Image: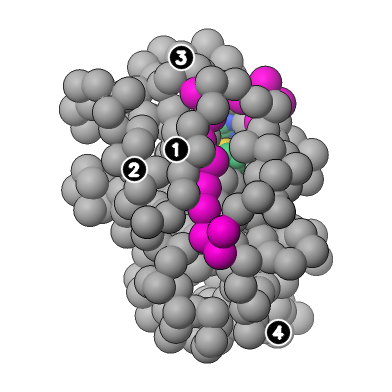
Amino acid sequence: MQQIIYLEETDSTNNWAKRHFEGFGAVGAVVAHSQTGGRGRLGRAWQDTPGQALYYSAVLKRPLAHPAGLPLYVSLAAAKALRREFDAPMQVKWPNDLLLNGKKLVGILCEGVPGGYVCGIGVNLCQPAAYFSAVGLTHATSLAAEGVEIENAAMVIPRLAQALTLEFGSAMDEFAEKGFAPLREIYRAACVNIGRRVWFAGGEGVAVDVDEAGRLIVGTDEGEQIVFTGEVSVKGIYGQL
Ligand code: BT5
């Protein structure tokens, strides 16, 4: 049985997992009812709606042959858990946002620490659509806002936390050994970037593929470019014209 710790409040479940990393077994997780300093990538904030969303971080203490693909693995693992629990058809925006009906439902923040990894996953469960417009997150959504019936979030949260934690156990043996390559087809099928116009730090073009290492391949006027990291906006997604 993998250990999942439930907290009433913390700054960020990723921070908490890092501070208590030594106390975890090979696989474990922490969930908070509320985060006072939830973090996104690149110093951005993750909004807190206590009890209406899942704030979860998995702790992973195992070597990964190709750790660069971890955020993509985690996005597929979360998509699988959400499909299983709620029958929700998720899409992925490279590298690791999960979208439902074109809006951001899940944010993922993977961080390396000495001896392993912390994988943070935020899932919006039952905030009403009006909440997102009130806080200016016009491209975000929750399961409930998309019509998924959530009777009791307090019961859904531990169920989803358990489903997610399973994905960090033996389910990830193949990824730990072989990296992203065996997942490439599944990822490509879910990826909203492919075939769309994208903008990235080095230019713009049409996303044509995701390679075996999980990098985005973009066809530009100067030829194919490989995007390793950073922000990529996608035409037609998040209000991008
Ligand atoms: C992410 O960053 O999407 C990663 C978010 C990870 C959150 C989890 S919660 C548990 C764990 N503990 C943490 O402290 N973090 C992790 P990024 O790609 O940088 O996106 C951040 C952007 O998403 C913000 O600038 C907003 O535009 C938007 N955003 C903020 N809160 C949101 C929410 N609740 N739902 C949807 N979008 C949100």
Instruction: Locate ligand 1 by image quadrant.
Output: top right
Question: Given this view, does label 2 or label 1 mark the residue nearer the observer?
Answer: 2
Label 3–label 4 contact, CB within 8 A: no
Question: Given this view, does label 3 or label 4 mark the residue nearer the observer?
Answer: 3
At x 40% / y 73%, what residue is drawn?
A: 170
The mark nearer the N terminus, 1 or 3, is: 1
**Residue 27 highlighted magenta (yes or no):** yes
Inter-mark Cα distance, 2 to 3: 22 Å
At x 75% / y 43%, what residue is drawn?
A: 19
At x 29% / y 32%, what residue is drawn?
A: 156
Left or right: 90, with 9 as reference point: left
Q: What number is the disc on residue 160?
A: 2
Left or right: 23, with 134 as reference point: right
Question: Given this view, does label 2 or label 3 mark the residue nearer the observer?
Answer: 2
Q: What number is the disc on residue 131?
A: 3
Q: What number is the disc on residue 223?
A: 4
Report x, y in % for residue 128: 36, 17
